[in-house]
């Protein structure tokens, strides 16, 4: 069994907020890709998250209370709908940097990206760490 820790520092309008989530996860390396899946609670409801990391892109898909499929490609902009119980919000994502190092025992990933939500800019510095659970 593995555990995941996701830390994100998000800056908007000169203010930085920190978020962190931890959960048990499944973790596999196969075919040159990294596969991570975990569940968390969000406002009392469940959210399933899957992360697929390959050489060309990283995809983070969430389903449940919120729904999204965020595609990170270094130096590229992608567009996606962010689904909430109150409706869908169109968002743009520009990835500045993706770095990762994973082995069978786990590893770490760093994502630097900007989220554009209807003209409001959010600068993100995210670290994803996966380790074997002791």
Image: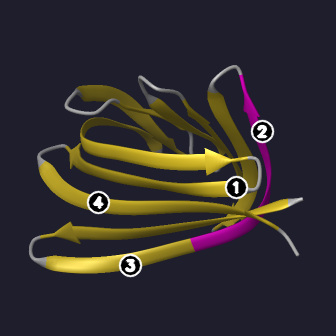
Which residues make up the magenta segment? 21-30
Which quadrant of the structure image shows residue 8? bottom left
Q: Position of residue 22 (x, y in %)?
A: 67, 71
Observer-side mark, 2 or 4, equals 2
User: Taking 1 as reference, is 53 above or below it?
Assistant: above
Is residue 26 at all visible to an observer of this figure?
Answer: yes
Residue on which disc 4 sits:
124
Q: In percent of the image, x 38 and y 78: which residue is there?
A: 18
Above or below, 128 relative to 14 = above
Q: How is the image coloured?
A: secondary structure
Nearest to N terminus: mark 2 or mark 4? 2
Q: Of tags 2 and 3, which is closer to the observer?
A: 2
Q: Nearer the viewer, mark 1 or mark 4?
A: 1
The residue that label 2 is drawn on is 28
- How many residues crowd mark 2 within 10 Å: few (<14), some (14–19), many (20+)? some
Q: Residue shown at 29%/60% (left/top)?
A: 124
User: Disc 3 designates what residue?
Assistant: 18
Image marks 2 and 3: residues in contact by CB distance under 8 Å: no
Left or right: where does residue 75 sit relative to residue 110? left
Between disc 3 and disc 4, whose residue precedes? 3
Residue 36 - label: none
Q: Estimate the spatial distance between the alpha carbons at disc 1 and disc 4, rounded to whole Å.
A: 23 Å
- The residue that mark 1 highlights is 106
Q: Position of residue 46 (x, y in %)?
A: 74, 56
Let me know if residue 44 appears in the view: no
- Secondary structure beneath dot 4 equals strand
């Amino acid at each position: 069994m593995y555990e995941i820790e996701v830390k994100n520092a998000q800056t908007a309008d000169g203010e930085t907020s920190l978020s962190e989530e931890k959960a048990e996860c499944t973790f596999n390396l196969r075919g040159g890709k990294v596969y991570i899946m975990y569940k968390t609670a969000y406002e009392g409801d469940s959210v399933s998250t899957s992360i697929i990391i390959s050489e060309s892109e990283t995809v983070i898909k969430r389903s449940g209370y919120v729904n999204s499929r965020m595609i990170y490609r270094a130096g590229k902009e992608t567009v996606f709908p962010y689904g909430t119980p109150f409706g869908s919000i169109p968002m743009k994502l520009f990835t500045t940097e993706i770095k990762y190092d994973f082995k069978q025992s786990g590893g770490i990933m760093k994502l630097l990206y900007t989220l554009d939500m209807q003209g409001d800019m959010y600068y993100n510095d995210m670290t994803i760490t996966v380790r074997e659970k002791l």
